[in-house]
Image: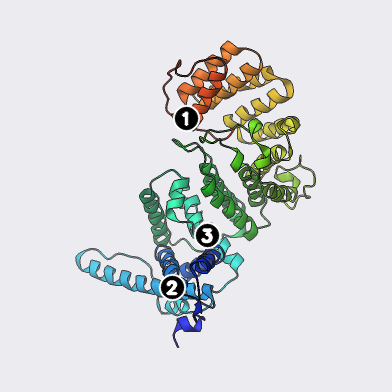
Amino acid sequence: MTSESRTGSAAAPSSAHAAEAALARAMREDWGRILAHLIRASGRADLAEDALAQAFSEATAQWRRALPERPSAWLATVARRRLLDAIRADRTRLRKAHLVAAPATMPGPGPAETALLSEASPPGSERDERVALLFLATHPALDVDVRAALALRFVLGVETWRIARLFLVPTTTMAARLTRAKRRIVRAGIPLAAPARAMWRERVDDVARSILLAFTAGYAPGDESTVRADVAGDAVRLALVAHEALPEEPALQALAALVTIQHSRRDARTGPEGEPIVLADQDRTRWHRDEIALGLRLLEGLPSESGAAAWPGTAASRRDESAYAEELGLQAVIAAVHARARRAGDTDWRAIAVAYARLESLTGSPVVRLNRAVALAEVHGPMAGLAVLRAAGDALPGHHRVELVRAELLRRDGRVDDARVAYRLAIEACPPGAERRHLEGRLHQLGEEPGAFRGGPRAGCSGGEG
């Protein structure tokens, strides 16, 4: 009896639709668990992920002819076989290389590991496997800019081309980054395991930062596409998985609340031409209320010390929380205040201004100060916002968003000529694309004819939703 037949691969009539549904479910539920087992058994993160991807590829063709009785076991068996093939081929290659060069050292399975690879059922609970994968992918020994990408690939199995699209790089570039990261894991002997509890806070913060980096990349303006909401959704899914795997960590709970609420606005954030629509002008009937409800439930379960003190229903503190957990909690509170307002005029700007003030004291970020200027203008009038904006402008010279906020506040204050000047400076600082066209439209509303102003972009312009 073969190992494949033991896993219950008996064929059942299938259809393309049924096969695709089974594959999608296996990708969602089994990818991370099987990959963690393969890496733990072999120590070869570089080969294990390729072997599992090959198993899924083979399943795409074979499951259309006949669905296995146990798809997860079928994938695990095929992936183990492909991994063993790859390890043996790698050993052969290294032996040949040894004849002409210095011996290479690449760990591989010995007899015990090979026996483990043949096991039908991966050891350990699913929760432990996902936790270990999260910490492996976001290990401090890896470059910061690749941790989020590797977490998306390892934990969720997101295709490389989608990750590349999220981070605005060619697929070949992202593939090379992921390959280097996987080889670094192998050569450095980074374990597939959660760190000791004493290191928990720092490492959980690293996990949260990596996931937030992936999410914000989806909403950062590109050349022509303002948002990539579909791929940013992968980061939201990763945040929810991370929280589910480590439910006792406030940083991950606050992160899940934050990105879930922000992502709920995706359908209203851009117009037909991809132009950004500011929060006040968005059609709130297009916000996903079920996702907002989920985000609010996550926020209400946070301990008060994690930045959610201003939010009703927060839980009593479970222990001292990290500053980053509080930072994420405050951002989630701000997102929640916006989400609960049925109309822009119903927004509780005073609560938002308080949250931004605490956030600024925590981070010292000029971008936070920029947003606080907007909130204060809503509470106390445009002049209050302009006073705070000056300091943000000093810290962000040449940033188009500073000039955009200045233009909007001057406009509200009735100083139209000064507002035109600020819009022109914002346009000059912003690269061509949807956001620049939006700025030109705002200037046109003040009577400036299209094409009358020909500003050129300056380097270093970036930003997100207003």
Q: Residue 397 location in percent, x, y?
A: 50, 23
Q: CA distance from mark 3 to mark 1?
A: 32 Å
Q: Residue 330 location in percent, x, y?
A: 68, 40
- Work out whether mark 2 precedes mark 3 in sequence or the reverse, and give the earlier one: 2
On-image quarter of the C terminus: top right
Task: Examine the rendered structure and indicate whether residue 438 appears above or below residue 83.
Answer: above
Give whichever of 185, 221 is nearer the camera.
221
Give whichever of 271, 224 is nearer the camera.
271
Q: Residue 166 location in percent, x, y?
A: 48, 46
Which residue in the protein does label 3 denote? 155
Q: Residue 423 location in percent, x, y?
A: 53, 19
- Work out whether mark 3 precedes mark 1 in sequence or the reverse, and give the earlier one: 3
- Work out whether mark 2 precedes mark 1 in sequence or the reverse, and give the earlier one: 2
Which amino acid type is shown beneath numbered disc 1? Answer: Cys
Which residue in the protein does label 1 denote? 461
Mark 2 element type: helix
Quadrant of res 346: top right
On-image quarter of the N terminus: bottom left
Crowding around mark 3 (Cα neighbors within 10 Å: few <14, some 14 to 19, many 20+) is: many
Image point (68%, 28%), residue name = 375
Closer to the eye: label 2 or 3? 2
Which residue in the protein does label 2 denote? 62
Mark 1 element type: loop
